[in-house]
């Protein structure tokens, strides 16, 4: 699989509040390298609009994260690695566990981190009043129930709360995949388009989003 950068610009994601709410998660946490706005590649945003229009009446997207600075990606990776190392495992095991949920910070075209491309988006669903729908797990949770299909298991569907989470995840999955996105199976909230993760999961020969610097002056949180 090759990467052929198409130089598509980053655009802000917060300009359609009727269907898309932006709550920059890491900026709210005060993390170095975070921004108050969520930025996405232009075609990613256009496809997100398409997905938003396909949502059932009364539902909206809430976007937590999109393009990341290299500084923020490094901070997140180091934080998760330290958390896993504190479990008493080897460095190799801590690295394996960390890479399930946080990509290694890399600008290398052969292994570029998804969020550094502007082609990855972390999001959930909310009702018309902005109340988050129950999804059966929190953003950035590293437990097994973060797997997108966790509540699809037969034994899980005997619980009504699990059925609600199952249905909400399926709604998100349906509208996003119909718009061309690919879900990262370990995280129900993470979707890709145009980057290496998307190409690998969809069997494409070419990705067209690599590492990108923001075309604007910014000051990290």
Image (spheres, rainbow, N blue to C red):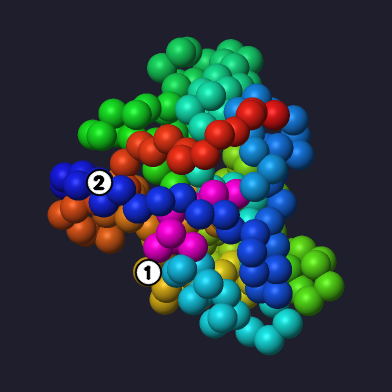
Query: What residue do we see at 56% from left, 69% from top?
Result: 172
Q: Quadrant of the C terminus?
A: top right
Identified at 65% across, 47% down, the residue is: 37
**What residue range appears in magenta?**
38-45
User: Taking 102 as reference, is 197 above or below it?
Assistant: below
**How many discs appear?**
2
Q: Nearer the viewer, residue 56 or 69?
A: 69
Name the residue that disc number 1 marks: 180
Q: Is residue 72 magenta-colored?
A: no
Secondary structure of the residue carrying numbered label 2: loop
Q: CA distance from mark 1 to mark 2?
A: 18 Å
- Does the image show residue 94? yes
Judging depth in this view, the residue of 127 and 160 nearest the camera is: 127
- Name the mark on residue 5: 2
Q: Which secondary structure lies at badge 1?
A: loop
Query: Is label 1 in contact with label 2 (beta carbons under 8 Å)?
Result: no
Residue sitting at 76 percent across and 39 percent down? 28
The residue nearer to you, when weighing 121 against 134, is: 121
Residue 105 percent coordinates (x, y)? 43, 27
Which numbered disc, 1 or 2, marks the residue closer to the eye? 2
């Amino acid at each position: 699989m090759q990467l052929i950068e198409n130089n598509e610009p980053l655009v802000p994601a917060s300009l359609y509040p009727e269907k898309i709410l932006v709550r920059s998660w890491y900026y709210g946490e005060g993390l170095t390298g975070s921004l108050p706005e969520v930025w996405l590649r232009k075609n990613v945003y256009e496809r997100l609009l398409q997905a938003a229009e396909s949502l059932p009446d009364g539902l909206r997207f809430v976007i937590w994260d999109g393009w990341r600075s290299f500084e923020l990606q490094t901070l997140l990776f180091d934080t998760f690695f330290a958390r896993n190392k504190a479990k008493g495992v080897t460095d190799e095991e801590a690295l394996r566990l960390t890479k399930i949920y946080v990509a290694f910070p890399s600008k290398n075209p052969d292994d570029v981190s998804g969020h550094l491309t502007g082609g990855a988006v972390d999001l959930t669903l909310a009702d018309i009043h902005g109340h988050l729908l129950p999804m059966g797990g929190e953003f950035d949770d590293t437990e097994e129930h973060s797997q997108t299909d966790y509540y699809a298991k037969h034994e899980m569907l005997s619980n009504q709360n699990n059925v609600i989470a199952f249905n909400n995840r399926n709604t998100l999955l349906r509208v996003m995949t119909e718009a061309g996105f690919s879900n990262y199976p370990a995280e129900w909230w993470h979707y890709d388009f145009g980057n290496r993760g998307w190409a690998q999961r969809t069997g494409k020969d070419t990705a067209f989003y690599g590492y990108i610097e923001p075309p604007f002056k910014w000051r990290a949180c």
